[in-house]
Image: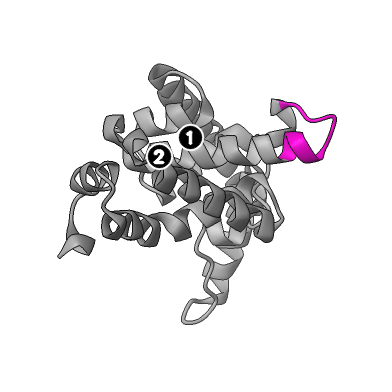
Amino acid sequence: MILDSSDEILCKLASQGDKEAMQAIYSRYYPLMLNFGLKYCDDAEVVRDCIQDMFLRLLCHPSILGSTRLLRSYLLISLRNQLFDFMRNHEQKISLEDLNPQFVDLEEFLQFESEGISDEEVNERKRLMMVLKELNANQRMALYLHYVRDLSHKEISDILDINPQSSMNLLYRSLTKLRKLLKLMILMYL
């Protein structure tokens, strides 16, 4: 069944014009892309429109996918670029710095579920969210992409437009700062 096919097979089929493969890619990655897009733009309708435009372009020019090695990275980078283009065309003064990822909902980042957990664990998660807010947007994004979305350093480097070594360094610095802040918080609550 085509839905169970690997990304590599789906890319190959979609690049040859197979609409079922394109639908499988869309179905597989739409939730991730929507979630990712909302980190850059808080208007869900704009993000949905950009995803639709991106897939419309892929349907019109399926050969684009022929050279794609990392489908997930390609889709996320394309969405980021589509959002940037949309925002640039609809707002006169926008720069790449204005398009920094925002972590509006850190509770989602922690998969915050209050059912079935103790009050102590809820408090620990709230303290962790306070510490995460101390990290800059790129540090939070690197942690999110690596640990929540399980992306490789190559994929993260493509998305954040940095080299893979910088991705590793960013993640290392983020974890180091996170540990330091958590130690300070633990000392404050002792």
User: Looking at the image, is 109 positioned above or below residue 97?
Assistant: below
Taking the image as shown, residue 190 lies to the left or right of residue 161, namely right
Is residue 185 located in the magenta-colored stretch of the structure? no
Give the residue at x 69% y 27%: 96
| Quarter of the figure that contains the N terminus | bottom left
- The tag on residue 55 is none
Give the residue at x 59% y 61%: 107
Could you say which is closer to the camera, residue 34 or residue 147?
A: 34
Could you say which is closer to the camera, residue 45 or residue 73?
A: 45
Q: Which residues are magenta?
A: 87-95
Q: Horizontal and vertical percent for residue 72?
A: 37, 43
* Type of amino acid under label 2: His
* Type of amino acid under label 1: Leu
Taking the image as shown, residue 30 lies to the left or right of residue 150, namely right
Reading the image, the residue beneath label 2 is: 61
Foreground mark, 2 or 1?
Answer: 2
Secondary structure under the numbered disc 2 in the rendered image: loop
Q: Horizontal and vertical percent for residue 27?
A: 37, 62
Quarter residue 133 falls in: top right
User: Looking at the image, is 45 positioned above or below residue 16?
Assistant: below
Taking the image as shown, residue 152 lies to the left or right of residue 16, namely right
- The tag on residue 175 is 1
Quarter residue 48 falls in: bottom right
